[in-house]
């Protein structure tokens, strides 16, 4: 078997010390590719070796490894009442000429945001979140960040972000007590979106919303990100 991939990172917060070791076999849900993971967390410093015959896209494999570590941390959270998070920072594999430090950006979103003048844009959006209806925008932005962090739940968070905008649109147009079909109709009018736009995001969200396991590749996520971000931007441009 080829040399394993080595992922490095840290369990956060570092002030809450954790040391565990474990090994397991895994199968990637969307591709069916299998592998073996050996996880070592020593004083919150993460090392994960992935033995696999498959030559992975390192971002897809990063998401798999993050899920493996997060699953253990979620169980520990349940058992001990501790809310840990995980950051994977680097992957190496000399035989495959892989040595990469991960950023925190989503490339397709970072690219579309390059020309934005940050402070004026931040202040403009912050002003729109003031007042009783601002909570819907806050929830939207928080869910968009979660969609970037949680690869398998990207569709879920993208759609919930859009639902928050639907509530915002209803509240600002006197439709809070109207049925959902009227609320969505008005939202589509304001945002210039189509039923097809919304259906693509909803279709990606539905399995996870109903408790089924989610799994996605980089290409799937890129399509969701671009469609969702454009829809959100269109709505913000018209309120």
Image (spheres, rainbow, N blue to C red):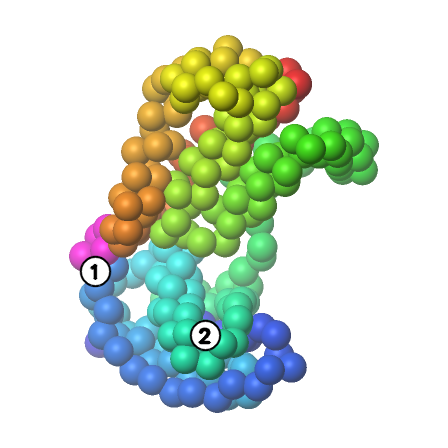
Asked if residue 64 is among those painted magenta in the image, a careful observer would answer: no
Residue pointed to by mark 1 = 33
Quadrant of the image containing the N terminus: bottom left
The quadrant in which residue 154 appears is top left
Q: Residue furthest top?
A: 189
State whether residue 105 is above or below residue 195. Answer: below
The mark lying in front, picked from 2 and 1, is 2
Q: How many callouts does the rendering have?
A: 2
Tell me, yes or no, if residue 23 can be seen here.
yes
Q: Is residue 18 above or below residue 122?
A: below
Q: Quadrant of residue 103?
A: bottom right
Visible in this render: residue 107?
Answer: no
Of residues 147 and 102, the one drawn nearer to the viewer in this rendering = 147
Classify mark 2: helix, strand or loop. Answer: helix
Query: Most prominent secondary structure in the magenta stretch?
Result: loop
The residue sitting at 38% across, 32% down in the picture is 201
Q: Position of residue 205 (x, y in %)?
A: 34, 40
Which quadrant does the C terminus fall into? top right
Is 197 placed above or below 108 here? above
- Residue 77, numbered label: 2
User: Where's residue 88, x and y in %?
Assistant: 51, 67
Whole-percent x, y for residue 19 in the image: 48, 88
What whole-number distance in Å separates the C-alpha atoms at marks 2 and 1? 29 Å
Q: Which region shows up in magenta?
A: 29-33
Which image quarter: residue 220?
top left
For the view shown, which residue lies furthest in the front direction? 177
> Considering depth in this image, is 134 or 27 the residue closer to the camera?
134
Tell me what residue is drawn at x 41 percent, y 62 percent. 62
110 shown above or below 236: below
Residue at left 52%, top 76%? 82
How crowded pointer 1 is (Cα within 10 Å; few <14, some 14-19, many 20+) is rated as few
């Amino acid at each position: 078997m080829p040399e394993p991939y080595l992922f490095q990172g840290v369990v956060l917060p570092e002030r809450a010390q954790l040391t565990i070791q474990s090994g397991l076999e895994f199968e990637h849900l969307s591709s069916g590719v299998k592998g073996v993971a050996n996880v070592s967390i020593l004083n919150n410093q993460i090392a994960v070796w992935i033995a696999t015959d498959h030559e992975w896209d390192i971002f897809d494999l990063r998401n798999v490894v993050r899920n493996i570590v997060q699953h253990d941390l979620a169980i520990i959270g349940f058992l001990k009442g501790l809310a840990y998070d995980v950051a994977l920072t680097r992957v190496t594999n000399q035989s495959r000429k892989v040595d990469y430090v991960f950023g925190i950006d989503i490339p397709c979103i970072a690219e579309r945001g390059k020309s934005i003048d940050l402070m004026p844009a931040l202040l403009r959006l912050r002003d729109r979140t003031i007042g009783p209806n601002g909570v819907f925008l806050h929830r939207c932005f928080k869910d968009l960040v979660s969609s970037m962090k949680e690869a398998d739940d990207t569709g879920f968070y993208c759609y919930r972000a859009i639902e928050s905008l639907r509530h915002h649109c209803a509240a600002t147009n006197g439709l809070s007590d109207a049925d959902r079909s009227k609320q969505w109709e008005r939202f589509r009018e304001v945002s210039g979106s189509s039923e097809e736009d919304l259906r693509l995001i909803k279709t990606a969200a539905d399995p996870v919303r109903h408790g089924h396991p989610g799994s996605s590749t980089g290409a799937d996520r890129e399509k969701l990100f671009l469609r969702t971000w454009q829809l959100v931007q269109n709505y913000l441009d018209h309120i």
